[in-house]
Image (tube, grey):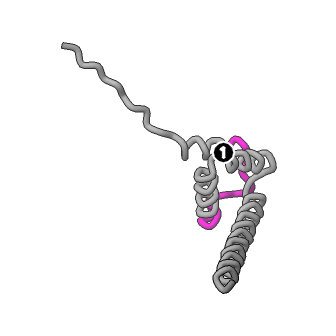
């Protein structure tokens, strides 16, 4: 029985640690959403929430970029959807590989 009690205590400990991490993540996400609401208009906010669903890394990159721009004073007023789309396109832009054919 001692082993079962120890295993149960270990499971409870892991569960509490997991729940604490989930609460921290939820609080951090809520903080990001509040910041976004201050920096972008409603349509741009909706677009960024859609990006978050599909491309979490891109969403986090946009958030960090917007925070840096806001702290530097480069954002005047709220960004509209068109500006956010331009920002997203610059972050996702890739160099198109050039294919060359060598003929003999």
Q: Which residue is mark 1?
A: 54
Q: Is residue 83 left or right of residue 104?
A: right
Instruction: Please give the name of the residue rendered at 70% of the width and 48% of the height, measured from the top-left corner.
Output: 53
Residue range highlighted in magenta: 69-82
Q: Quadrant of the N terminus?
A: bottom right
Viewer-proximal residue among 9 and 93? 9
Residue at the limit of the structure toward the front, as seen here: 1
Q: Quadrant of the C terminus?
A: top left
Q: Secondary structure at mark 1?
A: helix
Percent across and percent down for residue 2 are 66, 86
Q: Quadrant of residue 75?
A: bottom right
Instruction: Please give the name of the residue rendered at 60% of the width and 60% of the height, measured from the top-left corner.
Output: 64
Q: Is residue 59 left or right of residue 37?
A: left
Instruction: Please give the name of the residue rendered at 68% of the width and 71% of the height, measured from the top-left corner.
Output: 18
Query: Most prominent secondary structure in the magenta stretch?
Result: loop
Percent across and percent down for residue 51 are 68, 46
């Amino acid at each position: 029985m001692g082993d079962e009690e120890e295993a149960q205590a270990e499971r409870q400990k892991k569960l509490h640690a997991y729940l604490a991490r989930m609460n921290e993540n939820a609080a951090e996400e809520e903080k990001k959403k509040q910041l976004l609401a201050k920096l972008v208009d409603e349509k741009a906010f909706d677009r960024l929430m859609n990006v978050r669903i599909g491309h979490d890394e891109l969403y986090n990159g946009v958030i960090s970029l917007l925070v840096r721009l806001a702290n530097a004073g480069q954002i005047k007023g709220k960004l509209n959807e068109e500006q956010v789309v331009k920002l997203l396109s610059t972050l996702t832009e890739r160099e198109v590989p050039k294919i060359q054919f060598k003929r003999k």
